[in-house]
Image: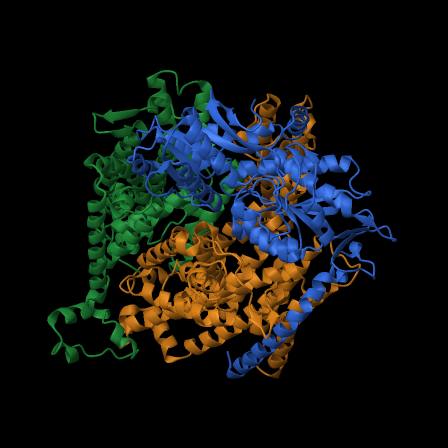
């Protein structure tokens, strides 16, 4: 468990003496209560200071040029769609972390592989004429694509676990991290060599071409956007049920809690870990295909940035925590969409905003918004 | 029956590897020698698989040979089937390269011994595929036969005392041998193996440095060692005079990464703080010097009468600003541990890059800062690769000195205590806040120093130079080399930064190989190539260490 | 590490600094001294003078190539590389120079300054490289520039369009492509006067090239009297969802979006505009977007989008002949791959023509090329007939013929609607 937060924060003054903390009661007498609180909770007060600055900035921007409420609603929808994709990837990070306490750095690439599989399936189905024939065949082709993407991602994930992670299960945590980074490079450049550097353009099946307009508000929801959001919510609920209600889910939680005791209880730890990778990779594969359908492009480095963002989102929500991954992802998506206009900055600042939010949240809550749930052990 | 099944399983794995390399475009890029490469690989795989089986199975000659045949046959047939399908598609005018970018008619041709026109025309690929299958089967068979060699006996002989002596003597001589080879290339008319001389020379330089490090490790302290050290160092100092521009340029980059590696080693290796955003401080140092010195930077253009500082004045400023940045970024992450720290530092790294990219009025944005002046000493322009390399070597020595002193000081011991267990360290009266910030600040100061050197070397710097992969490279190199070990940093930089530069001609394969190397290293030798003795103990995987690593 | 070792290291540090000081003086001699060349085949005559490249009988004349094979526009890079190769094939078929063949040393400049710096250092260190063709992108070429200038190796870029590439201070910097300044002016004029649009939103991809062009366009459009709404809004290369940025841009109700950047992002922006309620807003972009890949990326949404191109003064028959050769060699038409093939072909020919004009044969039958003479010869290229018209370099190294063309996607193909060469 994390050490109590206020014990090691008595900052600047103590820098001079490395070993001996200055007794706190020496200064308490004269200084006011607020200043002593600030000194004790230096980091928290820093955070509060930044939040106040942010609010001041948002208010002053809003006074200068105010956007209509529809605009915010529209951006909220953009953000939720973006967050939906992040969530599907973030769940993979969270599941693996919850059980193995390792960052599966290559998870974004697992998603990218699924995206490629979906793309080639789409090409084949378009060639066969399924995608644009009838709404029914079009819907079927989407399902087939998703299945293909999930299958390839699951294969990639399982092979990854077998080769790059399983031999390192007992190693200190830096070791699997480097292994995962290596696997990430490996997969990315494998895709570059196998499929070429050229971006591959998805052509949406006919049922996905088009948008809904909501009355006169000017808010527009694309079919793919809605599909992503709904599907990701359904998948997350499904995952939650699997983890909480099924026997395998119980085994997963047991393994997360304590591998040795789980083994004693007759749980096959290897099997559970593989199952975890299957779940996470399947979600990532679905995410890859959906991302391809929504943004119509996939290329060898497509997994990297979404992977990084999803990882950020997972940490934001509290890594190892399934609802946390979801909340973190949606929040990150919304921040990216709304942030620049709320702070009156050009759009290229969206990633700066996203990462700053992460830092800020972790200052207040060092274990993320919802904390770690799957297991409360930490190395 | 079991026997066949096992062989079949090994065969499928070999086939998977061959198929992977096939789709990666090895046949297209290596042309006709691809069959030789693949056959060698199959032989090797067959040898490796069959050797690691239990003794009683391995001793069974018939069993082994049959399995070898099956391994070769399965891979050969498998590849033939895939190639046949591709060839048929190609004959039908379907462009397979739209899916697998490398599978062009020339690719099929290289595997079957045909030309592009023949593949597309009426010539059947079957004879070529039959040849391929036979070749692979033969290779698998040979590989299995080789497992019957009495290797154990030879090794036992070698492991005896005289063997060890030979090894250590060889280690002593090896660096001089490689240096000699490198110098030999300088002699007119000498050409070794007909490869690109420049790269070969580079390779010998790397082998020299690597061998030197191993030799220094192996030789016992004493007069012998002192002589060795002096000799090697003199050779090293002379090296830039013999190397050509390109070799010096590559060595310069390696040197800069060594300096950074030593800095990150303080943060990760000694203090145990996993920092994935180290590039931020590198960027701060580089931009600090660039903005203060380039005649086209915002600072120089907008400060009336300010002509820009020279390198030797800019360097301390870059170091101080770097250290300050480390201190500043250290404050909010004080309470975080482990992976939270990793992701937040990663976030900082990205924020740093995005800020220099986006604050374009001050930093030049994507256009970067150009025309950064070279260091000038006593009126001499030191901007060429050779002098940059000398400066990098000097920097390397300075930071080595600095870190060794730090490591052996009270502070260094406090870091190590914190790395081992924060709670216990705190209970022992160590001020975690102070020593964490000092670790960040000293690591960042070194990165700032490397950044300033990098800026002056590059002449132009762009925000893209400071992307996440720099952090990852530096982290990987200290881990590959052996975390906590200074020689390891040098070796890691050579393996991860230097060698890929030689391999630039096979550009994309090198990154695939880089990834595979990282994974393999972590599995085979997680403590790194040249680990520090203390780390070697803690990083070695024990059967019972699971409980301690998850606590 | 023992104390003694530390003392030793400190001494060595001082020694190395001293050596560095000596090294400073010695270096230039090394660059000039031809005997340092490592290829034994290329041993120079003893009386070698000044900065010359000496090529032994039977050895090729080597031209460095920095081309963007990875990065944001790999298709364009491949197109350029293949055109370079075709040019070399043609030159060698025509007999090369004084019996020597030409040879390319192709390196991946990856469309960014960082990779180009490494590539340029490689060329500078390789004393057999006489000239460089490339780089493909603006940032990449800016990375090449100072190092090649130091090494006195002239370059000719086929496709780097930013005005910063050429200037009076750089005598080795040349290009066949036209300047973005011209492109921005023509685009602004066409939009303001011909299309009659006055409300602009300007976006860019935060690259040297895209941002540079966006800023040039902004000032050109404002100078004409148009309005640029809000700030310049950037996107990030590598992202694929630009809806939030477009929604923000859309609140100002622009009549058109001008995008400075490359094809992948351009295609996605054109496609996603239709999903955020900007169906009636015109999409206008640049030569980094012009080409078939844009239509592939944007799909149906590409229809009616505009892109300008820095076109050469092409002569139909010569180009048809080139296209046929290209298709025979690589299996695709050059236009399906990228737009800069003619410029690329011409840039190698321009280098070769200059080499042919300065190369002389010495007594031993070696080919001798004087670097400074070559730099001058490239800069004084005049009246060279190429695929992109008659090439004549001005005093800062802009050599391209032709002018800006404006294209619109109609019926799934780019159709020229205005500009140079249209009757």
Q: Considering depth in this image, is B428 or B278 the residue closer to the camera?
A: B278
Q: Is residue B529 left or right of residue B231?
A: left
Rendered hue of chain B is orange
Most extreme residue toward the right is C363
Q: Is residue A183 left or right of residue B458?
A: left
Colour for chain A in the figure: green
Q: Is residue B43 above or below residue A68?
A: below
Query: Quick check: C144 above or below B134?
Result: below
Q: Is residue B9 visible?
A: no
Q: How is the image coloured?
A: by chain
- Whether A206 is drawn above or below A341: the answer is above
Residue sitting at x 60%, y 60%: B249
Residue plotted at (65% across, 40% down): C347
Q: Residue furthest top?
A: A134
Nearer to the camera, B331 or C414: C414
Q: Nearer the viewer, residue C259 or B1?
A: C259
Residue C262 at what x, y percent from top left? Answer: 47, 38
Residue B125 placement (x, y as % from top left):
66, 27
The picture places residue C250, in percent across and down from the top left corner, at: 31, 34
In the image, which lettered chain appears blue? Answer: C
Q: Is residue A209 visible?
A: yes
On the image, which quarter does residue B271 sit in?
A: bottom left
Q: Position of residue B173 (x, y in %)?
A: 67, 71
Left or right: where B58 falls relative to B483? right
Whether residue C394 is situated above or below residue C12 in the rendered picture: above
Question: Which residue is at 58% across, 78% downward?
Answer: C12
State the quadrant of the C terminus of chain B. bottom left
């Amino acid at each position: 468990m994390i050490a109590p937060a206020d014990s090691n924060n008595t900052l600047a003054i103590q820098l001079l003496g490395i070993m001996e903390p200055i007794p706190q009661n020496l200064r308490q007498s004269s200084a006011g209560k607020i200043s002593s609180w600030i000194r004790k909770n230096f980091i928290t007060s820093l955070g509060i200071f930044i939040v106040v600055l942010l609010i001041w900035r948002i208010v002053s921007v809003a006074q200068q040029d105010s956007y209509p409420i529809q605009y915010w609603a529209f951006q909220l929808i953009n953000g939720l769609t973006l967050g939906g994709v992040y969530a599907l990837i973030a769940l993979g990070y969270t599941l693996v972390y919850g059980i193995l306490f390792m960052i599966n750095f290559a998870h974004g690439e697992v998603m990218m592989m699924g995206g490629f599989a979906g793309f080639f399936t789409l090409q084949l189905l378009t060639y066969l004429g399924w995608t644009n024939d009838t709404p029914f065949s079009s819907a079927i082709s989407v399902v087939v694509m998703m299945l293909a993407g999930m299958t390839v991602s699951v294969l990639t994930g399982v092979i990854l676990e077998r080769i790059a992670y399983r031999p390192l299960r007992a190693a200190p945590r830096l070791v699997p991290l480097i292994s995962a980074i290596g696997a990430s490079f490996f997969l990315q450049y494998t895709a570059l060599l196998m499929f070429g550097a050229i971006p591959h353009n998805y052509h949406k099946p006919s049922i996905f071409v088009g948008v809904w307009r909501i009355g006169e508000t000017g808010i527009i929801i694309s079919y793919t956007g809605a599909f992503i959001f709904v599907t990701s919510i359904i998948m997350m609920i499904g995952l939650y049920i699997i983890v909480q209600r099924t026997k395998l889910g119980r085994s997963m939680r047991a393994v997360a809690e304590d591998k040795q005791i789980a083994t004693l209880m007759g749980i096959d730890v290897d099997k559970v870990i593989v199952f975890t990778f299957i779940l996470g990779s399947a979600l990532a594969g679905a995410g890859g295909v959906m991302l391809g359908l929504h943004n119509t492009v996939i290329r060898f480095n497509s997994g990297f940035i979404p992977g990084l963002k999803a990882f950020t989102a997972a940490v934001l929500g509290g890594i190892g925590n399934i609802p946390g991954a979801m909340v973190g992802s949606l929040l990150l998506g919304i921040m990216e969409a709304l942030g620049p206009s709320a702070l009156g900055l050009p759009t290229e600042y969206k990633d700066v905003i996203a990462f700053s939010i992460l830092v800020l949240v972790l200052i207040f809550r060092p274990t993320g918004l919802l904390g770690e749930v799957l297991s409360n052990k930490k190395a | 029956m079991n026997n066949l099944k096992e062989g079949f399983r090994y065969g499928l794995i070999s086939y998977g590897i061959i198929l992977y390399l096939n789709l990666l475009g090895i046949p297209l890029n290596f042309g006709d020698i691809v069959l030789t490469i693949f056959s060698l690989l199959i032989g090797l795989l067959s040898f490796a698989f069959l050797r690691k089986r239990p003794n009683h199975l391995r001793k069974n000659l018939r069993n082994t040979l049959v399995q070898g045949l099956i391994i070769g046959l399965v891979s050969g047939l498998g590849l033939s089937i895939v190639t046949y399908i591709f060839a048929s598609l190609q004959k039908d005018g379907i462009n397979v390269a739209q899916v697998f970018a490398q599978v062009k008619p020339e690719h099929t041709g290289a595997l079957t011994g045909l030309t592009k026109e023949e593949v597309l025309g009426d010539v059947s690929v079957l004879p070529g595929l039959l040849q391929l299958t036979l070749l692979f089967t033969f290779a698998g068979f040979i590989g299995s036969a080789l497992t019957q060699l009495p290797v154990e006996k030879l090794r036992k002989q070698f492991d005896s005392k005289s063997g060890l002596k030979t090894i250590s003597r060889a280690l002593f001589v090896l660096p001089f041998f490689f240096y000699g080879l490198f110098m030999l290339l300088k002699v007119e008319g000498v050409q070794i193996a007909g490869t690109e001389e420049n790269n070969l020379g580079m390779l010998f330089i790397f082998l020299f440095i690597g061998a030197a490090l191993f030799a220094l490790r192996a030789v016992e302290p004493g007069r012998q060692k002192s002589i060795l050290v002096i000799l090697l160092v003199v050779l090293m100092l002379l090296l830039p005079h013999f190397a050509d521009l390109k070799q010096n340029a590559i060595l310069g980059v390696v040197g800069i990464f060594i300096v950074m590696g030593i800095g990150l080693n303080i943060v990760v290796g000694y203090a145990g703080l996993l920092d994935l955003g180290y590039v931020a401080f590198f960027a701060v140092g580089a931009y600090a010097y660039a903005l203060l010195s380039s005649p086209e930077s915002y600072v120089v253009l907008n400060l009336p009468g300010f002509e820009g500082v020279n390198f030797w004045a800019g360097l301390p400023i870059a170091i101080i600003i770097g250290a300050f940045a480390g201190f500043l970024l250290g404050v909010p992450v004080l309470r975080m541990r482990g992976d939270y720290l990793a992701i937040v530092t990663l976030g900082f790294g990205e924020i740093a890059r995005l800020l220099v990219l986006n604050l374009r009025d001050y930093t030049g944005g994507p256009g970067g800062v150009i025309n950064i002046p070279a260091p000038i000493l006593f009126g001499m322009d030191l901007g060429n690769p050779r002098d940059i390399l000398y400066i990098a070597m000097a920097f390397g020595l300075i930071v080595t000195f600095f870190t060794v002193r730090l490591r052996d000081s009270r502070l260094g011991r406090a870091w190590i205590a914190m790395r081992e267990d924060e709670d216990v360290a705190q209970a022992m009266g160590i001020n975690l806040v102070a020593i964490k910030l000092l670790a960040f600040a000293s690591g960042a100061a070194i990165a700032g120093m490397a950044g300033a050197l990098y800026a002056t070397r590059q002449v132009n710097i762009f925000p893209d130079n400071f992307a996440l992969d720099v952090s990852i490279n530096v982290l990987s190199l200290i881990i590959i080399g052996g975390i906590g070990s200074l020689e390891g940093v040098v070796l890691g930089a050579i393996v991860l930064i230097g060698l890929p530069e030689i391999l630039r001609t096979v550009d994309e394969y090198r990154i695939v190989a880089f990834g595979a190397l990282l994974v393999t290293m972590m599995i085979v030798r997680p403590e790194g190539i040249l680990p520090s003795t203390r780390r070697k103990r803690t990083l070695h995987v024990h059967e019972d260490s699971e409980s301690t690593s998850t606590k | 590490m023992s104390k003694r070792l530390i003392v030793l290291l400190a001494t060595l540090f001082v020694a190395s600094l001293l050596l560095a000081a000596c090294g400073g003086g010695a270096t230039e001699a090394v660059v000039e001294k031809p005997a340092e060349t490592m290829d034994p085949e290329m041993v120079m005559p003893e009386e070698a003078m000044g900065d010359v490249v000496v090529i032994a009988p039977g050895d090729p004349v080597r031209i460095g190539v920095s081309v963007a094979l990875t990065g944001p526009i790999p298709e364009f890079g491949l197109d350029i590389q293949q055109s370079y190769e075709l040019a070399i094939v043609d030159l060698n078929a025509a007999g090369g120079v004084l019996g020597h063949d030409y040879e390319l040393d192709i390196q991946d400049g990856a469309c960014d300054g960082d990779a180009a710096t490494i590539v340029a250092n490689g060329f500078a260190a390789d004393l057999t490289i006489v000239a460089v063709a490339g780089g493909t992108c603006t940032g990449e070429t800016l990375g090449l520039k100072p190092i090649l200038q130091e090494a006195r190796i002239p370059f000719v870029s086929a496709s780097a369009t930013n005005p910063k590439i050429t200037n009076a201070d750089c005598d080795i910097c040349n290009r066949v492509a036209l300047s973005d300044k011209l492109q921005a002016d023509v685009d602004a004029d066409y939009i303001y006067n011909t299309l009659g649009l006055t409300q602009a939103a300007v976006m860019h991809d935060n690259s040297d090239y895209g941002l540079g062009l966006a800023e040039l366009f902004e000032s050109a459009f404002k100078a004409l009297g148009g309005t640029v709404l809000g700030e310049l809004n950037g996107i990030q290369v590598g992202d694929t969802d630009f809806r939030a940025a477009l929604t923000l841009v859309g609140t100002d109700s622009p009549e058109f979006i001008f995008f400075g950047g490359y094809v992948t992002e351009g295609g996605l922006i054109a496609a996603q505009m239709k999903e955020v309620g900007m169906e009636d807003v015109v999409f206008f972009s640049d030569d980094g977007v012009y080409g078939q890949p844009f239509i592939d990326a944007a799909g149906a949404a590409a229809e009616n989008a505009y892109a300008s191109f820095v076109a050469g003064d092409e002569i139909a028959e010569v180009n048809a002949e080139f296209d046929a050769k290209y298709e025979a060699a690589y299996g695709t038409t050059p236009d399906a791959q990228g737009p800069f093939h003619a410029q690329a072909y011409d840039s190698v020919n321009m280098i070769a023509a200059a080499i042919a004009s300065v190369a002389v044969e010495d007594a031993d039958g070696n080919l001798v090329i004087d670097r400074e003479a070559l730099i001058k010869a490239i800069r004084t290229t005049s009246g060279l007939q190429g695929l992109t018209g008659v090439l004549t370099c001005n005093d800062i190294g802009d050599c391209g013929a032709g002018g800006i063309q404006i294209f619109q996607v109609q019926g799934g193909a780019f159709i020229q609607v205005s500009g140079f060469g249209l009757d």
